[in-house]
Image (cartoon, rainbow, N blue to C red):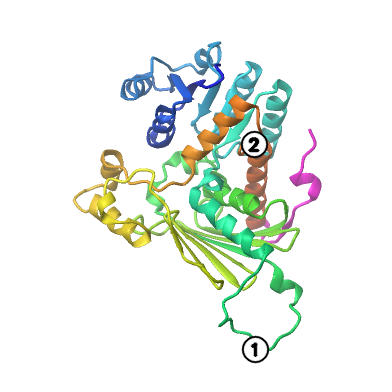
Amino acid sequence: MSKNKVTAAQIGCGKFAWTQDLPNMSRSERVDLKWVCDLDLAQAKKTAEKFNVPYYTDQYMDVINDPEVDMIKIATSHEVHLPIIEAAAAAGKHIFCEKPMAMYDEEAYKIIRAVRRSGVKLCVDLNRRMAPAMHALRKKYLEHVNDPRHNPWRYVEKVREMLPDENFPHMNIRIQDESSSYGLAHLSPLTGGGEIIGESVHWLDLACWFFAPALPCEITAFGSSLLSHGIYLKFNNGASMTLDFSCTGTFDYPKEQFEVTAEAALFRCLHFVENTYHGMPDSGREIFALQEDPFPEMGSGLEAFIAKNFANVQHCTNAKNAEQNTPLIVDKGHQSMLNGFVDAILNDTPSPCDEIDGFRATFLARKAIESIRFRQTMPIQLEDITPCF
């Protein structure tokens, strides 16, 4: 490894690798992508040709045994994360792992032990915490709660001392997804485990990052651990998060919306393309560039994104064709997460989403599934959420 560049390898060459991992590493001036690996050798070869990667293989140990490789990116099905991570850590490779880091707590514990014994760095691609729109939202939120300022027309019926509950911030996350987009690997108990463990780890991690240094103290969930569900997560400083995840929606409308209320103000993030702020002076509106935008002339913001999506798919018989040929992608933080992890490797600084963050997302997802099955709120012990290694 040079002081300015890491040599990387991609393990897993499916759809996500093609849309995020490989383009992002190819664009980076600090990453030299040497290998691609996939169980399907033909897919590995096709990927190497598409992204101009020198070597391809169907054996991940070929990658791990290469002394020039500094970092691996894992984009496989969930159940094989542990053996790949253990082998990579033993070989001294830094590890960038797709979410979830593990499907079960015990796997997560073994991963923590492996990377800490070897001294390598690990990053879990829980990318929402690195999205530019979410960083802007959190910055505005922290500025306001540290120095609350309100519009002069704020509604106050009678001046009185605030009750304790009125000082607790709340995050509301609305996800509307189209379940036909999930392959059976997402839903199989052997390889995916359902949408709480496969997808909602994103938003559980986001809430933990947003309200840090507060820690989760209880969780209540309802619905299906496989598909549509809701989760209420409470923190030890009184903050809370509610997730409403529906799998019966449509990709014709943006998937993700976030709202935070605190100190008589509202902070909104609309699918990573537009933030709006309400209840305070100089609220304004922030617009965020797309990661991939085939229609820049159509403007920016949420309504423009909806119009761009319609323009992109209206002549298709299957939206996946447009997704591959003219990708329209909002910036959910994937490139920023990669850049942050490369910084951590080159400068020996903390990972932007380390093994403890990855463990907590898995732990909370398993607790949510347990809550659904027992139909009750599950307490989260401090010693459980902060394991000792």
Name the residue: 58% across, 47% down. Answer: 201
- Which quadrant of the rendered structure holds the N terminus? top right
Q: Name the residue under label 2.
A: 354
Name the residue: 53% across, 15% down. Answer: 61
- Which quadrant of the rendered structure holds the C terminus? top right
The answer to whether residue 66 is above or below residue 293 is above
Q: Is 378 part of what is drawn in magenta?
A: yes
Q: How crowded is mark 2: few (under 14 residues within 10 Å), some or many (20 or more)?
A: some
Residue 56: in sight, yes or no? Answer: yes
Residue farthest along the left direction in this orientation: 315
Q: Is 57 part of what is drawn in magenta?
A: no
Residue 313: in sight, yes or no? Answer: no
Tell me which numbered mark, 2 or 1, is placed earlier along the sequence. 1
Name the residue: 27% across, 42% down. Answer: 326
Q: Give the range drawn in magenta.
A: 374-389
Q: Name the residue under label 1.
A: 157
Residue 80 screen position, x and y as percent? 56, 28
The answer to whether residue 384 is above or below residue 112 is below
Residue 71 screen position, x and y as percent? 55, 23
